[in-house]
Amino acid sequence: MPTDPFTLAVDCGGGGIKASVLDAAGTLHAPAVRVPTPYPLPPVRLVETIAELAAGLPRADRLTVGMPGMIRHGVVVSTPHYINRAGPRTPALPELVAAWAGCDVRALLEARLELPTLVLNDAQVHGAGVVSGTGVELVLTLGTGLGWALFDGGRLAPHLEMSHAPVTRATTYDSYIGQPERARLGDALWSRRVRRVVDGLRPVVAWDRLYLGGGNSRRVSAQVLDRLGDDVVVVPNAAGIVGGVRAWSLQAA
């Protein structure tokens, strides 16, 4: 691999898949391209979608993919949305649940694109694009659901699917502050829920810095942001692409 490799970074979400090629400094070498996430979405269709995006971009030396769910060493333990017939909040299909469970996405992508590949949870890639590398840093992405990534001294901690943890007896973080609830409640009431989540997690994690990212982070009201404290920072959603470069150097020891 070249000393200063170009990275094809792909951010896979529930509603869209974005990609670009970046140089070693994290500067876009081509404008980002986006397509709606196709459904139903078995692993092979995701791989082909990424290959089609790559075909329209400059040649890269390596590939970083961020996708929703529990990903370990490039293998899917579980994933939301992609197991569903037509995406978020539609019925899960048993054949898709079976196809994704234990799927080695990294191996599929390396075979198809012939590039060294890194596959992580999308919030982890997002975090790689914003963390300072000092102290304990938590990244929460607000989008279709809640994404979570924890860093200690710039090193990526093992992934926890906090989105599945209960807020109440019958409500998970995903259900509590995900996009459907934001659309139902409106930004003001939803922002108060975000504050409750942040306040509840603060004594659990004791972070030095919390980053709020994802497409809905810009929806958090100014009043709530003022009350969250100086240790909470809103970061641009573009970090999901930029983080594709730094993710290679922030792996857990």
Image: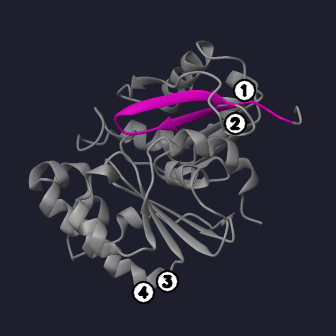
Is 15 a magenta residue? yes
Dot in front, 3 or 2: 3
Q: Are marks 1 and 2 in contact (CB under 8 Å)?
A: yes
Picture layout, residue 91 above or below residue 153: above
Tell me residue 168's x, y (percent): 22, 76
Q: Are marks 3 and 4 in contact (CB under 8 Å)?
A: yes
Q: Name the disc covering residue 107, or none.
A: 2
Q: Name the disc covering residue 24, or none.
A: none
Could you classify mark 2 by the number of other residues whose Cα lies within 10 Å: few (under 14), some (14-19), or many (20 or more)? some
Label 1 to label 2: alpha-carbon separation: 6 Å
At label 4, the amino acid type is: Pro
Give the quarter of the figure containing the C terminus. bottom right
Q: Nearer the viewer, residue 160 or 62?
A: 62
Q: Residue at x 69, y 48 (%)?
A: 246
Picture layout, residue 120 above or below residue 230: above
The residue carrying mark 4 is 203
Dot in front, 2 or 4: 4
Label 4 to label 1: alpha-carbon separation: 44 Å
The residue carrying mark 3 is 206
